[in-house]
Image (tube, rainbow, N blue to C red):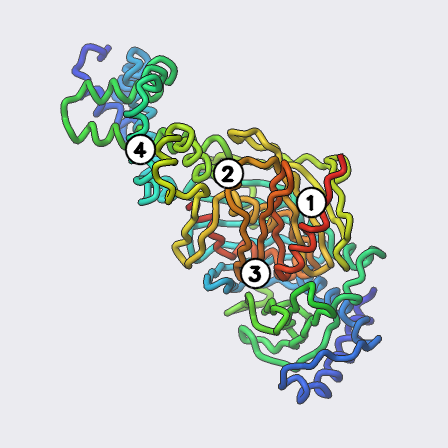
Amino acid sequence: MNTMKPTTQNLEMISALADGQLASEDFAAALAICEADDQALASWNAYHLIGDVLRSPGLAPQASDAAFLARLRTSLAQEPPLHALVTSRQPMVADMDREASNDGSFRWKLVAGFVSVAAVVAVAWNTGAGLLAPSAAPQLAQSATPQLAQARPEVPQQVLVMSAQGPVVRDARLQQLLAEHKQFGGTSALQMPSGFLRNATFESPQDARR
Amino acid sequence: MNLKHLRLLALAGCALASANYVAAQAPAPAAPVQAVESKNINEWLMRMHEASRNRSYVGTFVVSSGGVMSSAKIWHVCDGKQQIERVDTLTGPRRSTFRHNDQVVTFLPEEKLVRTEKRESLGLFPALLQTTGSHIGDFYQARQEGRERVAGVDADVIALVPRDAMRFGYRVWAEQKRGLVVKLQTLDTEGKVLEQAAFSELQFDVPVKLEKLAQMMNKVDGYRVEKPGLVKTTASAEGWALKNPVPGFQPMSCHKRPRVTPTGDEPMQWVFSDGLASVSIFVEPYDAQRHARESRLSMGATQSLTRRVEAWWLTVIGEVPMATLALFADGLERRK
């Protein structure tokens, strides 16, 4: 068993496992590490999450996310009871914290921070078939920081969605309903010859996710 | 209706075209209602519909709407009974949409996600024309405006002119041989183009096998499959009625879409159509946090309006003038 090896070496192994680079003996050894060490398993999950985020531009944090995260971090810092809640109730986030503190390297901390960011995004994502992420996130921010929202009235109540392709400002919820209208509202005699093609072709900002 | 009939009508249409050609050059005035023309709109629509069932092609389709331009590569294969289509976006995030009759599968490779759904609305035509409640000819008239070349094919230009200000007009370019729609414009009440879609390149009768596309459509290995769960309902069962119906618009369907949200709401979607344009009314419980302000937005041919009605939040979306959306919003009434 390799459980006695230093954690960093294990992590490299897990990283290779997540990348699909291991075969036969190494593969079995890596699996054994995961089985024996909860932290290793958590790392495996984290690497996959990182991989997913890197592969999918839609998941990558953008300027609006950064602003949201800054607000979220500030508000989390201002809420000690919430901290207690996080350590006791949310194992995923707690795991990330432990990994970060296990390694003194600043770079790894950065990655861990990124992953916990991704975790927050992913959690929001899973609540509503992907489309809800932008709308769910500010609600989280608002409920966590009522005082902040009041102090800064310019913070929009609705999520404004800026399309990369045009000056379209909409809220995420409207985007979702728009997509649903296109899907099920296409009751037109022109739908069959060309309406369907139009809707399948047209790059609605909703598909840009934000 | 048989094909012979269609061909005769097409011939008649061509004859009319040459007669109307000069008149069509100038912006057409609101023409007087003519029995022949109002009857022809159904024939034109039927011909376009038939062409999409009988014509196989590969092409590039371009959509321009609200300052946004998108394009896609299209494969369309049919054998008269069934049809399969593949639409691959060439702009924006990668996405492949397959349609086998009314079954639609959308691949989002960047998210490793597949959405599968049955779109009943796709099967509604030509039943939409045949139902007694739907008189497209009462609200639009067809007028041939000459011929033009689009994507390398000669096409008849047909204007579908609304008879009132409650709907938009359309200009359709239908391939002369069989009637396949090669270009479509949506025009506002002043005749300005709101949105247009057209083939930029088109090849007919290419050797693409129906089975091969069907195979690709079913290859979902490695993807997460998502199926939207729709629950059919009726507006009256949900406690809603339209006290003042909007002329020409018939209720088509009503459903709820359960989704996991922080509030656990299930918005109702009530769909109306006048045969060419459709309008969706969404109703959900009012939430002061999310529904901060009422809005009116327009994007290409699609308009949307949101409004608070007592304890409810209304979102009306459709390819109709804003004033028509307002009629729907005004007409909606709580009956519970």
- Residue picked out by circle 3: B207
Lateral position of residue B270 relative to residue A179, left or right:
right
- Residue picked out by circle 1: B270
Amino acid carrying mark 4 in the image: Ile
- How far separated are the C-alphas under marks 2 and 1? 21 Å
Label 3 environment density (alpha carbons within 10 Å; few <14, some 14–19, many ≥20): few
Q: Secondary structure at mark 4?
A: helix
Amino acid carrying mark 2 in the image: Arg
Residue drawn at (51%, 47%) of the image:
A175
Residue drawn at (69%, 61%) of the image:
B276
The quadrant of the rendering that contains the C terminus of chain B is top right
Query: Which quadrant holds residue B310?
Result: top right
Numbered disc 3: what chain? B
Amino acid carrying mark 1 in the image: Trp
Mark with earlier residue (2, 1): 1
Q: Residue B241: give its label.
A: none
Q: Would you say the residues marked 4 and 3 are in contact, meaning their CB atoms lie under 8 Å apart?
A: no
- Residue picked out by circle 2: B290
